[in-house]
């Protein structure tokens, strides 16, 4: 069935003429129509535009001018500005925002002929780990509708897990690609900071945000990285070196690969079953010739508090642009400018967003900047140094992506800290700017478990190689949730 | 160091966030919880450590000071709540 095909298989099928892009796109639009009511993974479905894009791809293919991936449908996280299409960041603040331009990730996708099925649901302004904070309602995990899909890229994760789209884009600031990928049985990659352009990607924390692929396989992630990655003049933080072909080294042997196992990633708080699944996955890599090396990341425990100063501080600055003046939500009958600002923002933002703006504002305010923000940035350097020391002894670092499998709705809402601690394994890589991915490694309580792989700067191809070799020897990534087969 | 309602009012004003009394109380509690979490950072000795603002050792790229974008005021202002003569309208600022 078409919805079980990977991007690679779809590419080959389209090339052979087994099906047209129109048929393919219609198939996924039908599935979204049939199933998304149960999941709420899409905020906007672009049926008409998608079919037009599909027809254009079919025409190009007939002329022989199509990109290899042209005509393949893709879901885009609703954090990327899409010209002429509602772009909400899952917030009331942008419920009326029709973007006048395309993000670079979107224009790259269009140039490759990819078809945009729609914009996926997410935690509001990317702040969350469960997709419970969206203005448009929570997203359900296709593996168990009483559980969260993870966040903030929960909509993208649920859509691909249920095969309502063969792949999707996500963004990751503290784990928001990797954790939902782990909770939904997907392959999710957060590239090195600067690898993928952030232009047109609504900013949460500018020194941490990165866009990346969420796919069924590592090979598919490599195909999508070839579309997404690259220098962009319009993003001054995008690195000015060419991206490699991420598919070139997928099949390299893992013989002699040193995999660092941080003791801090296997301690208190990690669910025993999740640990067992991850250790079994590591044994599988050893069978292929990899060598496990014990390493130490001593400042791991400080990464959550450091992140929860830095990210909210940057967010408080980034979200100050939402003021009811030029676009987005404006309150009714403002009496003066201050009232305009306060009520537009007070009414337009949800409570988690306001909470983080408050923390960030406090951490940056006079008298507290040194004690909080500057101190957190110094600790950030210590965390970066930990990884540099570790990579002297190993090639990649491995461990669990999430301390638990998918949890129930409302379970972590009593105290925000419980939610924040679920990011313990993913956050440090954002602080250091390193690339990392999560891949399906097995199940616990019938829910997916993800293995996280962390690489050195610019080593996405190596991560994809390890993941691909693992997926050639295992079948976890091919499992489908019962309800959506 | 626990936050008081007065601190919450000050922070909300700096952030231009209009909050109800109920919200202020709830934020007072949750912010104090979060401060408990981040207070761990205070105990760490960071003497001599430079802050890390950006993970890569790069500098701001520059380009020639030549106009490269076209004027798209119409398209960008099309979605504004209120405009007039190419300007954005807001309630009176100066008394």
Image: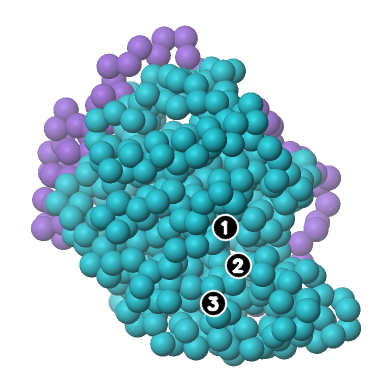
Give me the residue at 12% from left, 39% from top: B4
Neighbour tally class for label 3: few under 14, some 14-19, many 20 plus, Cα within 10 Å: some
- Against A70, residue B58 (above or below) is above
Tell me the element at label 2: loop
**Residue A451 pos. (x, y %):** 44, 44
Give me the residue at 21% from left, 59% from top: A408
Q: Are marks 3 and 1 in contact (CB under 8 Å)?
A: no
Q: Quadrant of residue B61?
A: top right
**Chain to which mark 2 belongs:** A
What quarter of the picture does the C terminus of chain B occupy?
A: bottom left
Chain B: colour as depicted? purple
Tell me, yes or no, whether dots 3 and 2 are on the same chain: yes
Q: Which chain is cyan?
A: A
Residue under circle 3?
A3
**Measured Cα–Cα span from mark 3 to mark 1:** 14 Å
Q: Is residue A411 visible?
A: yes
Give me the residue at 56% from left, 49% from top: A473
Residue under circle 2?
A6
């Amino acid at each position: 069935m078409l919805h079980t095909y990977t991007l690679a298989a779809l590419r080959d099928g389209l090339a052979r003429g087994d099906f047209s892009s129109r048929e393919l796109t219609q198939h996924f639009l039908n599935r979204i129509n049939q199933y998304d009511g149960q999941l709420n993974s899409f905020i906007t479905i672009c049926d008409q535009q998608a079919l037009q894009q599909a027809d254009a791809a079919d025409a190009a293919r007939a002329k022989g001018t199509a990109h290899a991936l042209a005509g393949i449908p893709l879901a885009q996280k609703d954090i990327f500005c899409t010209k002429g299409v509602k772009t909400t960041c899952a917030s009331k603040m942008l419920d009326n925002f029709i973007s006048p331009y395309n993000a670079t990730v979107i224009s790259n996708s269009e140039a490759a002929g990819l078809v945009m099925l729609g914009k996926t649901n997410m935690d509001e302004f990317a702040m969350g780990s469960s997709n419970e904070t969206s203005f448009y309602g929570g997203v359900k995990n296709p593996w168990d509708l009483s559980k969260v899909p993870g966040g903030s890229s929960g909509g993208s994760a649920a859509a691909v897990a249920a095969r309502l789209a063969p792949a999707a884009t996500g963004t990751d600031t503290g784990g928001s690609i990797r954790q939902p990928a782990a909770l939904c049985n997907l392959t999710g990659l957060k590239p090195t900071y600067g690898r993928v352009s952030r232009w047109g990607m609504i900013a949460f924390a500018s020194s941490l945000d990165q866009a990346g692929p969420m796919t069924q396989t590592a090979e598919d992630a490599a195909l999508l990285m070839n579309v997404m990655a690259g220098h962009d003049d319009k993003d001054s933080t995008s690195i000015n070196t060419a991206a490699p072909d991420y598919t070139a080294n997928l099949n390299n042997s893992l013989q002699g690969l040193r995999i660092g196992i941080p003791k801090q990633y296997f301690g208190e708080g990690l669910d025993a079953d999740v640990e067992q699944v991850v250790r079994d996955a590591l044994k599988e890599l050893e069978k292929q010739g990899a060598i496990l090396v014990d390493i130490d990341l001593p400042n791991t425990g400080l990464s959550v508090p450091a992140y929860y100063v830095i990210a909210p501080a940057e967010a408080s600055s980034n979200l100050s642009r939402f003021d009811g003046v030029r676009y987005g939500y404006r309150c009714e009958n403002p009496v003066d400018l201050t009232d305009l600002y306060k009520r537009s923002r007070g009414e337009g933002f949800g409570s988690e967003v306001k909470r983080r703006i408050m923390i960030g504002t406090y951490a940056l305010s006079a008298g507290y900047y040194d004690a909080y923000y500057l101190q957190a940035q110094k600790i950030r350097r210590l965390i970066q140094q930990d990884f540099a020391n570790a990579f002297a002894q190993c090639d990649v670092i491995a461990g669990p992506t999430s301390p638990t499998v998918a949890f129930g709705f409302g379970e972590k809402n009593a105290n925000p800290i419980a939610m924040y601690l679920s990011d313990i394994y993913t956050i440090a890589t954002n602080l250091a700017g390193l690339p990392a991915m999560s891949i399906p490694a097995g199940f616990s309580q019938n829910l997916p478990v993800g293995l996280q792989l962390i690489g050195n700067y610019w080593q996405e191809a190596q991560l994809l190689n390890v993941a691909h070799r693992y997926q050639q020897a295992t079948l976890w990534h091919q499992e489908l949730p019962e309800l959506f087969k | 160091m626990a936050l008081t309602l007065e601190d919450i009012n000050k922070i909300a004003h700096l952030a231009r966030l209009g909050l109800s009394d109920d919200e202020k109380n709830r934020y007072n509690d949750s912010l104090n919880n979060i401060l408990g979490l981040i207070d761990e950072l205070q105990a760490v000795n960071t003497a001599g450590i430079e802050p890390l603002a950006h993970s890569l050792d790069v500098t701001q790229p520059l380009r020639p000071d030549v106009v490269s974008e076209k004027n798209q005021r119409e398209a960008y202002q099309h979605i504004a709540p209120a405009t007039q003569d190419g300007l954005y309208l807001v309630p009176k600022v100066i008394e």
